[in-house]
Amino acid sequence: MNGQAHAGRVFAAVDIGASSGRVMLGRVTDGRAELETVHRFPNGVVELDGRLHWDFDALFDEVLTGLAAAAGTAAASGERIASIGIDTWAVDYGLVDKAGKLIAQPFSYRDERGRTAVADVHKVLDPARLYATTGLQFLQFNTLYQLATERELRGVQALLIPDLIAFKLSGQRRTEATNASTTGLFDAVAGEWACDFFKALGIPKNLFPAIIQPGGTVGTLLPEIAARTGLPAETAVVAVGSHDTASAVAAVPARQEDFAYISSGTWSLVGVELDSPVLDEASRLANFTNERGVDGTIRYLRNVGGLWLLSECQRTWAAAGHQQELAALLESAAALPAGGPQINADDPAFIAPDNMPDRIRSAVRAGGAVLPDRPAAVVRCILDSLAAGYARTLARAEELSGKHASVVHIVGGGSQNRLLCQLTADASGKTVIAGPVEATALGNVLVQARAAGAVTGGPSELRALVRASVQLDSYKPSLGKYTNATGCAAMAQQ
């Protein structure tokens, strides 16, 4: 692998999660990768006509603002932005007409519409058949369930959110493979669209554009985008692991192959990396998913609840006039004794935004316990529940895949939460290595850099570069409670 300087060449990473977004500049020189944030912006669902949507127009405007800032920053340093890579969350899409006009603001996966279509879809496609082909875990908001609620799909194309951004930048329509694998319409073995499913559901066969692999070039900037951002029109838009978890896993700094990972942010994605999917009935019943990773790897994982629970609690408390600083909350939560009440953190009841502390206390009461009406107690319940969920999911992933993990890597915003990391080590009985926080952006940049020839090699070489670039923290399993929560930084919600 190499990582030498290439004439001031830098890479722009557009990295957007369900709670926030950022545009970052990535530099790969002398065997190290460095990130510089040039623009951060909030993201979140909006209610339109009683339904939950994404304000894509505002989101795209923030992307252009960020790219303009990136262009200015690079120019001031005498650098050239070689390409742009985009990653976001999965499953959601926008519909564009033949002229390329977005016909409505995209629905959010937090809207209930997908749930209403599950039974109808399963009448046409048996869940066992679906899983045997797609290897996708059942989630009520998977793309195929959302599509089943659409009234008219003729004359339009569906672009997943990162592909929609790439289209608005370049005018070119593609579907990046790692995100395609989350739709429920993707053949996990063939690595292509499951055409029989389109026909069975009455979905036009060309609803989605052709698939592109990470590292492929989508196109170059449209003239109006170049003018708005100050970037040259020949700036490439490069496909990366456009599902943010795919980019995050590509940047897991593992030294060996026998590792597990937890991408911990708004959601938690818990699993192992495989060479081929696990499509048997035991895997389906355990609700594990087989999603594509960079370089054709399989991300064998399960969605577990995430830091959405904590951020929603903070939002509820703040709205009631009780602002709760995260560091103080974690310090107080760490001082509480172990063995407190827990909830099922990935229960669908926690998906929609609402009064999260009340819903958590109700879930505890339903389980026959009582949760004190104190923020610290609620936070400790969330983190204990997440750690226990992580441990259960890791053990099941090992059992179903036959791959033993000697170490667990936590990447993303949750890697900064020292209490969560220690509780995970204790619950799993495995050493936890925390970091990098910006794993998704690093994975995004490294795929771009490799496409440009600035680095070479496969997953192990990219991960070695990550290890050389970031500081990592290690947590050993302990028998006693963990009380040292000092130094907790505010978590970046992914």
Image (cartoon, helix red, strand yellow):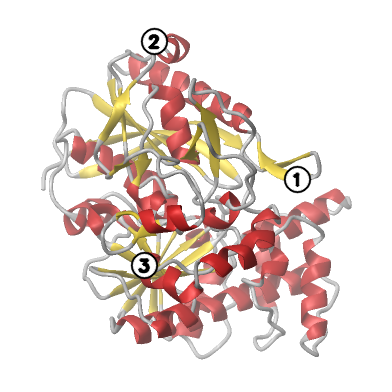
Element under label 1?
Answer: strand
Do the residues bearing badges 2 and 3 touch, measured as CB atoms within 8 Å?
no
How many labels were placed on the picture?
3
| Rendered view: 172 above or below 86 | above
> Which circle marks residue 51 in the picture?
1
Please name the amino acid that badge 2 sits on. Pro
Give the mark nearer the N terminus: 2 vs 1: 1
Q: Is residue 266 left or right of residue 357?
A: left
Task: Report the residue marked by disc 3.
Answer: 133
| Residue at disc 2, secondary structure | helix
Task: Identify whether 376 is placed above or below 156.
Answer: below
Q: Which residue is mark 2?
A: 223
Disc 2 crowd, CA 10 A, few/some/many (<14, 14-19, 20+): some
271, above or below 22, in the image: below
**Circle 3: element type:** helix
Q: Is residue 332 left or right of residue 187?
A: right
Q: Mark 3 Cα within 10 Å, few/some/many (few <14, many 20+)?
A: some
Q: What kind of residue is marked 3?
A: Thr
Three-letter residue code for mark 1:
Arg
Q: Residue at x 42, y 41 (%)?
A: 208
Q: Position of residue 453 (x, y in %)?
A: 14, 35
Across and down, in percent, residue 492 comes to 55, 50
Q: Residue at x 39, y 80 (%)?
A: 397
Image location (x, y in percent) of residue 262: 44, 67
Q: Nearer the viewer, residue 160 or 304?
A: 160
From the image, state whether disc 2 or disc 1 is nearer to you: 1
In three-dimensional space, the C-alpha distance between marks 2 and 1, rounded to whole angstroms, equals 35 Å
